Structures are given as structure tokens and as C-alpha cells.
């Protein structure tokens, strides 16, 4: 790809991410992912109107983005350390989004981040699962949920559904092949790799 095109794409992705981060900073109180997406898409729900969230500068910033696309970007921001998911209290399972110091520096142009989400918008044309793969996908999803519950974090922070689908189709049985799956990095391998490889191998055998 032409270097200038790459730069333009990166600038666009960074601009979108900065707007979303700014939206979170201007909220009068912390919101979860769904409500934040509602603000960015310009929802006219009673919640938005009653709390005057439609008066925010970032209200309806991305009406043409789907909810799933905005969720993908927010997940990217969390994984990049610019956002974090925080629970209101240990007694309430109410995760809200909170901007980090790194995120504030990114908004202000004091630091850069490698934020790539457009690639995840593309239909990777993964064939539909057969019955065997449906069972494996469900098993891997349960394993992801188990890790999420143990760490008291949302499941997407372990890995996204696109990555789970890639694991199901590629069926990696060692670390090298695991790293070849889109969305899998060294941190995932270190924290969860052995258990996912074990689950895939057990299912195949």
C-alpha cells in the first residue's frame, strides 16, 4: 500500500479514536459501552434526552457507524491502554468506561498510539461453521467467559468474537500457529494460550 495512503488511514483512525475519547471526558458521569455508543450514534432515547447528553459536542459524531463497529473501536482503545473498564463498586456488576492518563495524553497530542480498527470492519469471509466447529466455537466461548469471570473483566478484553472465529477455523495446536490467528498477541499467548490450545486439541482428538 502507498505510504501516503497508510498515513492518511492512520490519521483517520487516530482522529476517530480521539473523538471517542473526548466524548468520554465530556460526559457528566461515567457510562458503559452501550450508553456511550448511544451518545456517539445520536440516540434520541429518553435516557439521552433526560440527562441532556444530546447537548454534548460529540453527540451524534458517528451516526453512520454501526454499533458493532463502535464497539470494535472502543475495544481497541481498551486494549491499547487509552481506556479502561472500571466497576462502580465491588458490590455492583456495572462496568463503566474511564479514560486513562495515557488516553488523556493521546487526546492532547502528547503521545502516539498504534490504533488500527478499520481492518476489523472488513468482512474476512470466514465460511460458516459446520456442526463440529459450532461445538468448538461454543467451547472456546465458554473458556473465554471463564477467564473473564475469574479476572472480573468483560469477555471482549480476553479476545473478540472475530478472534474466536479465527481460532475455531484455524484450530491452532501450538504457540506458533496460535500467533498466526488474527487478533492473537504475545500477551494472550502468555495469559491464556496453553488453555485455548488444550481445549482445541481435546476437541479435535
Image: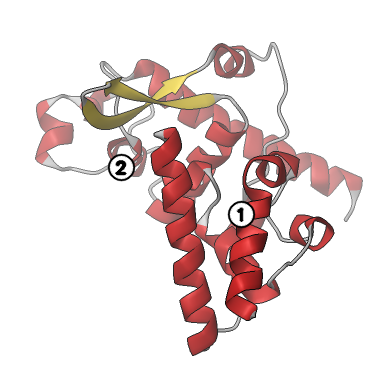
The x and y percentages for residue 116 are 68, 44
Left or right of residue 92: residue 109: right
Image x and y of residue 181, in percent: 72, 61
Which callout, 2 or 1, points to the residue nearer the camera?
1
Label 2 packing within 10 angstroms: few (<14), some (14-19), many (20+): few
Q: Which residue is mark 1?
A: 195
For this rendering, which residue is in front, 51 or 149? 149
| Residue 156 coordinates in the image, percent (x, y) | 48, 47
Q: Position of residue 69 (x, y in %)?
A: 48, 52
Q: Earlier in the sequence, mark 2 or mark 1?
A: 2
Query: What residue is at 51 percent from the left and 48 percent from the top?
Result: 72
Mark 1, other Cα within 10 Å: few <14 / some 14–19 / many ≥20: some
| Residue 172 lies in quadrant | bottom right
| Label 2: which secondary element | helix
Q: Is residue 50 left or right of residue 139?
A: left
Residue 50 vs 140, above or below: the answer is above
- Residue of label 2: 34
Asked whether residue 70 appears in the rendered view, the answer is no
Amino acid at each position: 500500500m502507498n505510504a501516503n495512503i497508510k498515513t492518511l488511514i492512520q490519521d483517520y483512525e487516530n482522529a476517530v479514536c480521539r473523538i471517542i475519547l473526548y466524548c468520554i471526558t465530556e460526559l457528566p458521569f461515567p457510562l458503559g459501552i452501550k450508553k456511550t455508543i448511544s451518545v456517539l450514534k445520536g440516540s434520541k432515547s429518553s435516557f439521552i434526552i433526560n440527562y441532556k447528553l444530546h447537548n454534548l459536542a460529540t453527540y451524534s459524531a458517528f451516526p453512520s457507524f454501526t454499533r458493532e463497529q463502535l464497539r470494535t473501536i472502543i475495544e481497541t482503545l481498551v486494549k491499547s491502554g487509552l481506556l479502561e473498564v472500571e466497576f462502580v463498586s465491588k458490590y455492583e456488576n456495572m462496568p463503566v468506561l474511564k479514560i486513562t492518563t495515557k488516553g488523556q495524553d493521546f487526546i492532547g497530542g502528547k503521545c502516539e498510539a498504534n490504533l488500527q480498527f478499520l481492518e476489523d470492519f472488513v468482512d474476512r469471509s470466514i465460511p460458516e461453521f459446520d456442526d463440529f466447529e459450532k461445538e468448538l466455537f461454543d467451547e472456546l466461548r465458554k473458556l473465554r467467559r471463564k477467564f473473564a469471570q475469574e479476572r472480573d473483566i468483560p469477555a471482549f478484553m480476553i479476545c473478540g468474537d472475530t478472534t474466536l472465529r479465527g481460532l475455531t477455523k484455524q484450530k491452532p495446536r501450538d504457540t506458533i500457529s496460535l500467533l498466526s490467528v488474527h487478533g492473537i498477541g504475545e500477551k494472550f499467548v502468555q495469559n491464556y494460550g496453553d488453555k485455548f490450545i488444550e481445549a482445541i486439541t481435546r476437541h479435535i482428538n
